Image: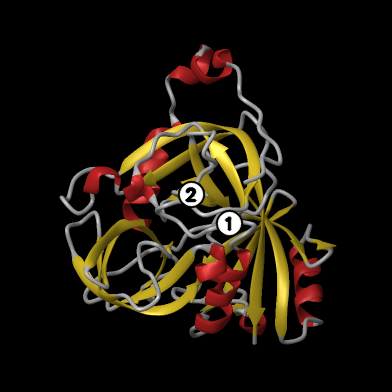
């Protein structure tokens, strides 16, 4: 295996000063309670166990390929509420170290799917790994939320005993165990920035995650294959334009997303009421008239929308019809 970059964060940064009492833990824990699940499957003669992430309300879940290998059977999903659902393999991405499964949900509603960010990570950046440590979710206990700092990135070119993934990983100081494989890693704003892998360099012993930018093709696969625009709704400004799945309001010289259609592709990719709309494609949005003019010229297909959520810029890939 080759280390491309490895930088250790000074202990003073990790443990000192005002960061010691972390006010983000409660927010991250609340986000994780609705999105993070435990996953089990039977493969050959053994039982596999790990963590997964709801991608949207239709029951699709992202997890590590070691938790649900190709050819698995009896796939089970455990939620924080104590519910157990059976699932089937949707697609296995062996080279990326992940699987997407679909749970057969009954009387279970997910209010909002996760937001993904694909930013480059800097050494010293604070992240949060959340998952099924020590089978806490399977035992209907509190989801494990472990914070840690980015201490380096490197490229894995060999497999470990519990993982077949090779490629870029980001090393973080958050603690984890092997049931964290497939666990989402969140930014302090509650957006998904990566997924825990149990592969690691033999000379280094910290938690590794696959950055979300490596997994972007998996997220795009789900969004394009399973997008559900839903029905347009109306408000005082009339119908939602062009099947975008959301409408807007103008406040104090800025444009904000207002209503988002439940179950729409817009909701599945993380657009939500209150987010500030910055751009559609390369065009900046500063007024409702500007928004109407730009949307009126759009053609059906894929567009990129940039929003600001809690001070963080997010670029979302939206399919319109």
**Left or right: 45, with 32 as reference point:** left
Q: Residue at x 50, y 76 (%)?
A: 264
From this viewpoint, is residue 235 visible? Answer: no
Q: Residue at x 71, y 78 (%)?
A: 302
**Left or right: 133, with 166 as reference point:** left
**Tag 2 secondary structure:** loop
From this viewpoint, is residue 197 visible? Answer: yes
**Left or right: 164, with 146 as reference point:** right
**Tag 1 secondary structure:** loop
Q: Check disc 1: other Cα within 10 Å, few if <14, some if 14-19, many if 20+.
A: many
| Residue topped by disc 1 | 166
Q: Check disc 2: other Cα within 10 Å, few if <14, some if 14-19, many if 20+.
A: many
Q: Which mark is residue 189?
A: none
| Residue topped by disc 2 | 199
Circle 1/circle 2 CB separation < 8 Å: yes
Q: Position of residue 230 (x, y in %)?
A: 49, 83
Q: Position of residue 50 (x, y in %)?
A: 32, 56
Residue in the foreground of this view, choosing between 311 and 196: 196
Question: Of marks 1 and 2, which one's residue comes earlier in the chain?
Answer: 1
Q: Quadrant of the C terminus?
A: bottom right
Q: CA distance from mark 1 to mark 2?
A: 8 Å
Looking at the picture, does residue 181 appear above or below residue 83? Answer: above
Q: Position of residue 45 (x, y in %)?
A: 22, 70
Looking at the picture, does residue 248 appear above or below residue 120? Answer: below
């Amino acid at each position: 295996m080759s280390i491309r970059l490895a930088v250790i964060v000074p202990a003073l940064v990790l443990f000192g000063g005002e960061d010691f009492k972390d006010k983000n833990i409660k927010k991250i824990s609340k986000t994780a309670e609705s999105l993070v699940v435990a996953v089990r499957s039977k493969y050959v003669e053994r039982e596999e166990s790990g963590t997964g992430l709801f991608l949207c309300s239709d029951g699709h879940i992202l997890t590590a390929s070691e938790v649900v290998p190709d050819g698995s059977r009896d796939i089970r999903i455990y939620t924080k509420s104590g519910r157990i659902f059976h699932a089937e393999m949707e697609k296995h991405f062996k080279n990326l170290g992940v699987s997407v499964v679909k749970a057969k949900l009954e009387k279970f509603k997910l209010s909002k799917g996760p937001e993904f960010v694909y930013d480059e990570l800097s050494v010293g950046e604070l992240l949060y790994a959340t998952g099924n440590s020590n089978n806490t979710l399977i035992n209907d206990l509190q989801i494990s939320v472990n914070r840690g700092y980015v201490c380096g990135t490197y490229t894995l070119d060999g497999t470990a005993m519990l993982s077949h993934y090779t490629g870029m990983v980001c090393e973080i100081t958050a603690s984890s165990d092997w049931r964290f494989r497939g666990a989402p890693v969140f930014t302090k704003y509650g957006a998904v920035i990566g997924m825990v892998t149990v592969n690691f360099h033999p000379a280094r012993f910290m938690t590794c995650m696959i950055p979300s930018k490596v997994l972007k093709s998996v997220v795009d696969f789900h969004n394009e294959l399973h997008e559900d625009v839903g029905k347009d709704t109306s408000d005082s400004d009339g119908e939602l334009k062009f099947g975008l799945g959301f409408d807007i309001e103008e406040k104090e010289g800025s444009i904000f997303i207002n209503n988002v259609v439940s179950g729409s592709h817009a909701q599945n990719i993380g657009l939500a009421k209150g987010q500030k709309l910055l751009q559609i494609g390369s065009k900046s949005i500063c007024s409702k008239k500007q928004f109407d003019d730009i949307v009126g010229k759009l053609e059906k297909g894929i567009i990129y929308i940039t929003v600001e959520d809690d001070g963080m810029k997010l670029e979302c890939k939206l399919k319109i019809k």
